Image (spheres, rainbow, N blue to C red):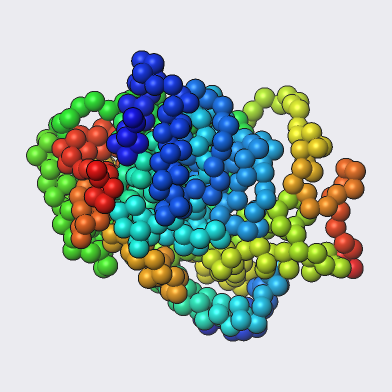
Amino acid sequence: MAISKNDVLHVAALARLDLTEDEVVRLEEQLNAILEAVSKVSELDLEDVPPTSHPLDVVNAFGADEPRASLQLDDVFANAPAHDDNLFRVPPSG
Amino acid sequence: MVDTLRLTAEEARALLERRELSAAELRHAYRDAIDARDAELHCYLTLVDDAEGEGVPIALKDVIGTKGVRTTAGSKILDDYVPVYDSTVASRCKAAGLSLLGKTNTDEFAMGSSTENSAYGPTRNPWDPERVPGGSGGGSAAAVTAGLAPWALGSDTGGSIKQPAALCGNVGLRPTYGTVSRYGIVAFASSLDQVGPVTKTVRDNALLYGIISGRDECDSTTVDVPPVELPEAEDLNGVRIGVPKELNEAEGIEPGVAEAVRRAIDLAAELGAEVGECSLPRSVDYGMPCYYLIAPAEASSNLARYDGVRYGLRVEADNYYELVSRTRDAGFGDEPKRRIMLGTYALSAGYYEAFYGQAQKVRTIIAREHAEAFERFDVLASPTSPTVAFRLGEKTANPVAMYLSDLLTIPSCMAGLPGLSIPCGLSEGLPVGLQLIGPQFAENTLFRVGHALERAIGFDTVPERLRS
């Protein structure tokens, strides 16, 4: 199951990474090597085995439904690259 | 004069309690050691000048959020990020009086086994500065070994506490999944990430684990934890130690490493433990592939938050989507990009079942194999790392070779099990780590076995080149 250059570009678009041409070339080679190593999982016949998504046998964690103070707006925007009053500022998406 | 190379946290605490030393004097001793040695080793990314706390100082890996103190996760994308709240472990350390010395170096987003993936340059191994300290928590491990902190916290996803502890010759605990809160920790792979202590002794480790562990309402994966017992016993009577064949005979284990581990296991038998062989038939062969599907998949989702909008680096553009893509390409280093790409691919339409779905089933097999071994044994023993500390640059060009550094730590991580690494000897003049794995919530057993072995082995944690 080899990854082509187009696959790399497609996945990069999904992951919102504006890769350079060099990175695309390098990642195509490295991802193929890594995928070859990890494809080993497909050797096992695990049809009847349930998946594990979480290592502890814990279902639901309930807490008291009491209102608490959240972050102050000054703190919320303390690390923001750009904001207007109480909004994060970004360029248009269109 | 405080010898920070030898002083344990427990001894430091006793000195403070007896008022033989003030907290300020103790901090100064560590700052002096940092000034003397950190230019060479580069354990710290940020030093803290005025920390509150009248207790023993501590260093925190730079993925642990600290209010008002820059937290980079070893990444340029968080170069000027200053958290506005404390992580739960940082608050618990503060509540216990521990004063923050600084933030330690890490592979970017804790992705790596050598700290060479840090955007701020690698940390060097105090035993031999031409070699890596392991990773991702190489900064914390090297700082403890070099006397630049009495103890430290690391974080572990597939071996990032245990493997650096092994390569630097100190004690690292990856606690049971769910015992230590991740609230305020920079997330990597959430079904695996755990915070844990890095110390000179097993008793220090138990003390620090006691401070940070326990249920936290801010992290719904945490649970109630059995009370921590500080280990005293020097025998191992009644303890059953299993030696998994696959973890001890895996391809790539250096002969000197295997030999030191074998001697430690023989010593355990002399101390009264019942030692027997066991098998984890598929956990080692399939653990690494399983990990490198699940961890990158979760990472690709967790790292989606770095978009240049709310915090972190922003590369300006006229269009929002371009802003996000350019920011992420400029801000992430090679390893996070590799893992984001791999994880996004493994989760994408058409591949999800074959990769991520299948890896989750392998994870079940790994957990079952360990559970079966724990029907007969209290603890499993093996090398922590297949090799001693390797040379800087030796594996950077080959991601798969680097990934194999965690071959022996990954399987128990996948099963959410606790693991303790203690130094058990030298090979080629470099430390070898013994990995002790227990069933979930068996930290006290690991401390007991680790402590008794530590006493019997008598390993000198101070690197030869630093002994005076």
* B253 left or right of B192 in image: left
**Residue B379 is drawn in which quadrant?**
top left
Task: Name the residue: 31% across, 58% down.
Answer: B128
**Quadrant in which the C terminus of chain B appears:** top left
* B134 left or right of B340 in image: left
Task: Name the residue: 35% across, 61% down.
Answer: B131
Q: How many marks?
A: 0
* B382 left or right of A84 in image: left
Is residue B134 visible in the rendered structure shown here? Answer: no
Q: Is residue B231 above or below residue B48?
A: above
Is residue B456 visible in the rendered structure shown here? Answer: yes
Frontmost residue, B386 versus B423: B423
**Residue B147 is drawn in which quadrant?**
top left
**Quadrant in which the N terminus of chain B appears:** top left
Task: Name the residue: 32% across, 39% down.
Answer: B5
Q: Is residue B18 above or below residue B422?
A: above
Frontmost residue, B427 versus B353: B427
Tell me residue B170's x, y (percent). Answer: 31, 44
Which residue lies most toward the left here?
B270
Tell me residue B152's x, y (percent). Answer: 44, 39
Q: Is residue A11 above or below residue B466?
A: below
Tell me residue B46's x, y (percent). Answer: 56, 46
Tell me residue B40's x, y (percent). Answer: 42, 55
Frontmost residue, B246 versus B7: B7
Task: Name the residue: 26% across, 68% down.
Answer: B251
